[in-house]
């Protein structure tokens, strides 16, 4: 293949992928070599909760994944009230979790091998006794937890090539868990934690309340209005509903009552995309993308009467703050990553995958989402509002 035919951006991505693969290929033998000289008794049969003074909890992926980890992190705090709990969260979204009452600090995950050694040195400074990997980016997550110096490392599923670094030997796969929350709670249970509450933890900040009120007031939205949120973006294209269908849904909703207003959420990079949808709906639709910082977004989402969304982190945020969702699923399985509790408050629309085999997250098309029509989503929203 002649690289001269690649566009500059494609070539850059190819080089990055090749570099990551090269580092991955070096990491595995290095960990095998280091582990061979580790004589510590690190199996769970040697684990004593009384000796745990410092704990690392890892959830270094997306917003929703980390929110799904918060019930397990709370269980760790309740079971180890005197221990210091340090979180390893994704740098892109960790501001959302800075005020989580169950952690004492955050060490950022910078992506791939960025600041790999610096992060490990920071880990070692904390002298962790226990590392719990709730949801991490591999192949870095498990080796980094091991190189932190923690004697006991627990992760599920534990079927990857790095399972030899883990303390839990009994095999579990994703299929062994009904939902992502259950998988994370099982990790906590293996660490001796008691499970008292399975609801997600997401504080709503006072500063966010003031910002949200000002934002809505500046857009002529009153306290008495019925605010419906649209989360139009997603982490992958295959999980996104179509912009023209969001626009048609918005028109029907604002026409249903003079009190209905639509607020479209998203990242700063998605502002133009969201603005086109809002413009198609009309004056009763506004865009909050890029206008409300992520850490204050829970305050705005809490104001919604309902959020229409695909399988997104904002869907989990909405559930966490008590706002009902009309959740649109096709590629993903709502039973594993959709609403987990308060099911009577939410409506899930689940369609079958259209392709076999399914490319899942790697799919660049919205074929599955074509099966979700505007009428069905409108009915779901009206059901929640009633």
Image: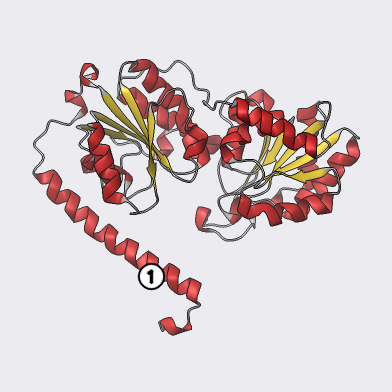
In the picture, which quadrant includes the C terminus? Answer: top right
Residue 54: image x %, image y %? Answer: 27, 26
Coloration mode: secondary structure
In which quadrant of the rendered view does residue 73 lie? top left
Secondary structure under the numbered disc 1 in the rendered image: helix
Residue 369: image x %, image y %? Answer: 66, 52
In which quadrant of the rendered view does residue 272 lie? bottom right
Q: Which of 377 and 74 lies nearest the eye of the viewer?
A: 74
Q: Which residue appears at 74% of the width and 53% of the height?
A: 275
For residue 70, side relative to residue 364 (left or right): left
Q: Which residue is mark 1?
A: 15
Above/below status of 304 relative to 294: above
Above/below status of 305 relative to 118: above
Q: Which of 146 and 288 lies nearest the eye of the viewer?
A: 288
Above/below status of 89 relative to 22: above
Residue 305: image x %, image y %? Answer: 74, 29
For residue 229, side relative to residue 54 (left or right): right
For residue 286, side relative to residue 86 (left or right): right
Q: Which residue appears at 55% of the width and 25% of the height?
A: 203
Q: Which residue appears at 41% of the width and 32% of the height?
A: 183
């Amino acid at each position: 293949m002649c690289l001269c035919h690649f566009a500059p951006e494609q070539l850059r991505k190819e080089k990055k992928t090749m570099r990551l693969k090269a580092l991955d290929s070096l990491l595995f033998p290095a960990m095998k070599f280091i582990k061979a000289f580790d004589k510590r008794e690190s199996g769970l049969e040697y684990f004593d909760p009384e000796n745990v003074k410092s704990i690392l909890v890892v959830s270094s992926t997306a917003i929703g994944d980390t929110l799904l980890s918060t019930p397990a992190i709370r269980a760790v705090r309740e079971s180890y009230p005197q221990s210091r709990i340090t979180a390893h969260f994704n740098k892109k979204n960790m501001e959302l979790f800075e005020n989580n009452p169950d952690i004492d600090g955050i060490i950022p995950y910078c992506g791939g091998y960025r600041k790999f050694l610096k992060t490990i040195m920071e880990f070692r400074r904390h002298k962790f006794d226990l590392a719990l990997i709730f949801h991490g980016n591999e192949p870095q997550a498990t080796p980094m937890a091991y190189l932190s110096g923690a004697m006991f490392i627990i992760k599920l599923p534990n079927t990857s090539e790095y399972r030899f670094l883990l303390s839990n030997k009994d095999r579990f796969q994703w299929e062994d868990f009904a939902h992502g929350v259950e998988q994370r709670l099982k990790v906590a249970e293996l660490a001796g934690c008691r499970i008292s509450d399975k609801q997600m933890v997401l504080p709503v900040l006072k500063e966010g309340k003031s910002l949200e009120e000002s934002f809505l007031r500046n857009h002529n939205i009153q306290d008495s209005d019925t605010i419906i949120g649209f989360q139009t973006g997603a982490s992958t294209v295959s999980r996104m509903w179509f912009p023209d269908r969001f626009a048609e849904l918005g028109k029907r909703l604002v026409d249903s009552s003079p009190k209905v207003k639509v607020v479209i959420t998203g990242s700063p990079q998605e502002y133009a995309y969201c603005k086109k949808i809002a413009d198609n709906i009309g004056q009763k639709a506004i865009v909050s993308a890029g206008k409300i910082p992520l850490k204050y977004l829970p305050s705005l989402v809490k104001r919604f009467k309902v959020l229409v969304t695909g399988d997104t982190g904002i869907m989990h945020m909405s559930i966490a703050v008590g706002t009902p969702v009309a959740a649109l699923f096709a590629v993903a399985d709502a039973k594993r990553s959709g609403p987990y509790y308060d099911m009577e408050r939410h409506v899930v629309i689940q369609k079958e995958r259209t392709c076999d085999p399914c490319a899942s997250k790697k799919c660049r098309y919205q074929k599955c989402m074509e099966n979700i029509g505007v009428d069905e989503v409108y009915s779901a929203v009206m059901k929640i509002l009633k």
